[in-house]
Image (cartoon, helix red, strand yellow):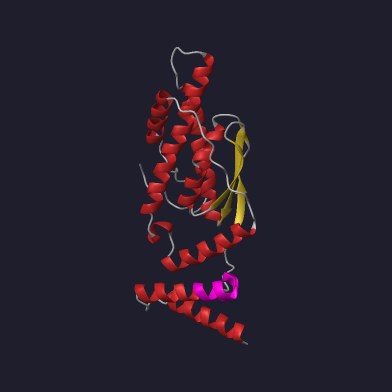
Amino acid sequence: MAQRSMKERAAALMARANDPASSEAEANLCMQKAMDLMSKFGFTMEEVSGDQAEEIGASSTPWTGGRPGGAMVFVQNAIAAFTNTRGAFRGRPSSGSAMTYYGYGAERDLAVWLHGHILNAIKVESASYDPGPYSPAIRAKDRKSFAIFMARRIAQRLYAMSETLDDAGRGTGTEVMIVKNQKLDEHFESLCLRKAINRKISVFSEGAEAGKQAGENLSLHRPVTGQGATLALPSN
């Protein structure tokens, strides 16, 4: 009986938080209290809100062998942060990688597009980068530095853009984003996935600087298509 009462109270608080008549401060307070009750009594978001209109799913990217595909380990978390997804990395920077993004449809779609777009750009730019008249071993390591620092610069830009996205930019309200984040976190944690490990790398300054510049110049604006609505990227 107490469990039912607490569940009803959490649902009432969430409804009040989503009421347009509630002030921003009141809405935030009610949502926080609802989350506290859910955490304390182990309620799921579906049990409290009944929201099952949009299911969390997974989208995987093709496996990419070798460099520069392995450089994606340095940008994957930024893609997930910007698109409000959660990512599971498979592989190693030295041998290649694949990625699975968990989240809602439009966000997953954008994450997979960004992953492919950035990976292709790193491949093209790395192939055209000329390290200079050095030995084959030095040229290979310098090109590796280029790929890694191009990915890292793109990651910095994505993190910066994610901080500028307000609720209107994501197409949802504050309370809806809180609900979606809670459900997404619970789903991802239930998978018990291991996090990717960032390994130490040898850096060649020439390749690193050239890679940073290439990462700065890459356009992250997704072309408009007729495939449905997606999270909009700022033009740059």
Magenta residues?
35-48
Magenta segment includes 18: no
Kindly report the secondary structure that dominates the magenta region of the rendered protein: helix
Total marks shown come to 0
Q: Nearer the viewer, residue 193 or 112?
A: 193
Q: Is residue 201 above or below residue 194?
A: above
Of the pair 15 and 230, the residue shown nearer to us:
15
> Looking at the image, which residue is at 55% across and 71% down?
39
Specify whether residue 226 is in view: no
Q: Position of residue 65 (x, y in %)?
A: 62, 31
Q: Position of 1 compared to 147: left or right?
A: right
Q: Point out residue 207 in the picture as x, y percentages from the top left corner.
A: 43, 25
Q: Is residue 93 above or below residue 37?
A: above
Residue in the foreground of this view, choosing between 146 and 49: 146
Q: Quadrant of residue 216?
A: top left
Q: In the image, is residue 173 above or below residue 111?
A: below
Rendering coords of residue 175 (x, y %): 44, 68
Q: Can see residue 169?
A: yes
Which residue lies at the image location 49% right of the left edge and 28% below the top edge?
A: 202
- Classify 235 as above or below 188: above
For the N terminus, the quadrant is: bottom right
Q: Residue at x 54, y 30 (%)?
A: 68
Quarter placement of the C terminus: top left
Left or right, 102 with reference to 225: right
Q: Position of residue 70 (x, y in %)?
A: 56, 34
Q: Quadrant of residue 223?
A: top left
Q: Is residue 38 magenta?
A: yes
